[in-house]
Amino acid sequence: MGSNNADQIYDLDAILSELGQFGRFQIKNYILLTIPILVSGIYTISFVFTAANPQYRCFVPECENLTETTFHTEWLKNAIPYKNDEPTQCYRYENVHTNDTIIFNNGEEFCPSFWFERNEIQCNDGYVFNTDHRSIANDFDILCKDQWKLTLPGTIHNIGQFVSQPLTGIVSDKFGRKFAMSIGLLASVICGISRSFSPNYLWFVTFEFLDAAIGSAVFASAFILGTEFVNPSKRVLMSSIICSGYAFGEALVGIIAWNVLSWRRLLQYLYGPGLILIVYFWIAPESVRWLIAKGRHKQVEKIIKNAAKQNGVTLSDKSLAVLEANAIVSSESKTTGPKEYTLTDVLKNISMLFRIINCSICWITCVFVYFGLSLHSVEIAGNIHLNFIAVSLVEIPGYLATYLCLDRFGRRKSLCGSFILAGICCLSFIFVTNELLTVKLILFSLGKCAITMSFVVIYVYTAELFPTPLRQTLLGLCSMFGRIGAMVAPQMPLLAKLWEPLPVFSFGVMSCISGLLVLFFPETLNIKLPDTIEEAVNIGKKV
């Protein structure tokens, strides 16, 4: 080892072990990192309620008073057609007795069936809503027309992430994880608050796109930051803790939306507190591994010595000598730092190219099945907010399973097993009749937990499969392809028109195929994170 190459002197995992596995310094930083993950869960899913399609029906002026009416009345089936035991939103029966007035039966409004013919006509007199919650459907008059405008914000959000994630990865690898995360947080807050003042639909979707495009850096940067700062034995624990914050963030959206009637006020409540997160520019930690890769050894020495002080440990003479030697090298020579890589360097390597393609396929499956199961979930309760909260929190057992399995069975077996389990649950779901509702609920919950586990494992796995200088760039690239799954998942109901079980069948088949493709990855359990392309290629090989 040449002493003039600072990067070769470090054994960072050994130094991190001396600092202690989970001391005061690490706990403080993980709390700081869990908050952006929780916020990311909030900001990613807010469109579910801001662009919700409320339950409504036609107002029938000859039968009710708009200021005093209720959504369900005894005479409603006489005036409005029903579908799936609910009144249709945009049609009513034609009144052939236009001169008749409301009849009251024991104080109740009553409209006899002979007033109406079974000829359906569109609503012309307004609507009666089954909820006091308002979404953009109310304010921008997206009722019974242009219904695609209510599904578009979700697609726009995922397109924003698809376009930006490789770019945010490059920014993170170039300027640091802390910079990318802090910029993403601030931009999301600005876009979210701006969206709450939208004067029209175009303004709303524009800022939805910008929110996703810039804010997508938050989750990936915080995750990479946490992964790079711990030694291999604690990466899984860190990943499970951080990802649980995402599920709680989603559930928090449901809780707040349940109690806030206006979508504008909802956005202000969700995004407003985020203004305080501007302090992350100063208090968030920077990745020690990234600093080493950039040759900023004086900052490395400062961070590690501060960590030792907070944890109440004394570094060995060997570790102190390494830190000081690298700091001297950093001061004396700015040009002898580690080799920089470009994306082209990785793509030229056949082994790395195959790894990227395989990883991208697994990401597409993960995101496709995860969002697909959420969109096709059975109703846990009639209240849409309670249903959403429950579907979010069912992910927590998946995170727990990740922590229990990942270090026992390794990354490859855990990812393969969780994919296969999700696939078996989806395929089995097809053959269970509606009479066995409990069995269907168990299969759904188990499948959602399994694909949630896959999501956590693939984040950990991707971070360990690629070299430090391009780690977040390649994570962003694979995650970008994953967004294809998120864009396709909402369209799955169209396949149900061809064959009702086809969407769930697609989830099951893709999960099983990806489970088999995982077997081509090398095992990364307890390995040192690769800092060069050569080290990444040689993972699992005896060299």
Image: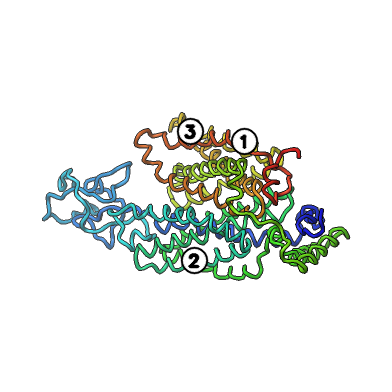
Residue 254 showing in the rendered view? no
Residue topped by disc 2: 269
SS assignment at label 1: helix
Please give the name of the residue rendered at 64% of the width and 49% of the height, measured from the top-left corner.
Answer: 463
- The tag earlier along the polypeptide, 3 or 1, is 3
Query: Whole-Å distance between the Cαs marked 1 and 2?
Result: 46 Å
Find out whether the residues at labels 2 and 3 contact each other: C-beta distance under 8 Å: no
* Picture quadrant where residue 321 is located: bottom right
- Is the residue marked by circle 2 packed among few (<14), some (14-19), or many (20+) residues within 10 Å? some
Residue 95 showing in the rendered view? yes
- Residue occupying the far right of the picture: 317
Please give the name of the residue rendered at 58% of the width and 68% of the height, measured from the top-left corner.
Answer: 277
Pick the front one: 286 or 279: 286
Residue 8 at x, y = what percent?
77, 55
Residue topped by disc 1: 520
Residue topped by disc 3: 429
Query: Whole-Å distance between the Cαs marked 2 and 3?
Result: 38 Å
Q: For the residue marked with disc 1, what is the amino acid?
A: Phe
Along the horizontal axis of the image, is 248 left or right of 130?
Answer: right
- Is the residue marked by circle 3 packed among few (<14), some (14-19), or many (20+) residues within 10 Å? many
Q: For the residue marked with disc 2, what is the amino acid?
A: Tyr
Query: Whole-Å distance between the Cαs marked 3 and 1?
Result: 28 Å
Find out whether the residues at labels 3 and 1 contact each other: C-beta distance under 8 Å: no
Residue 36 at x, y = what percent?
59, 61
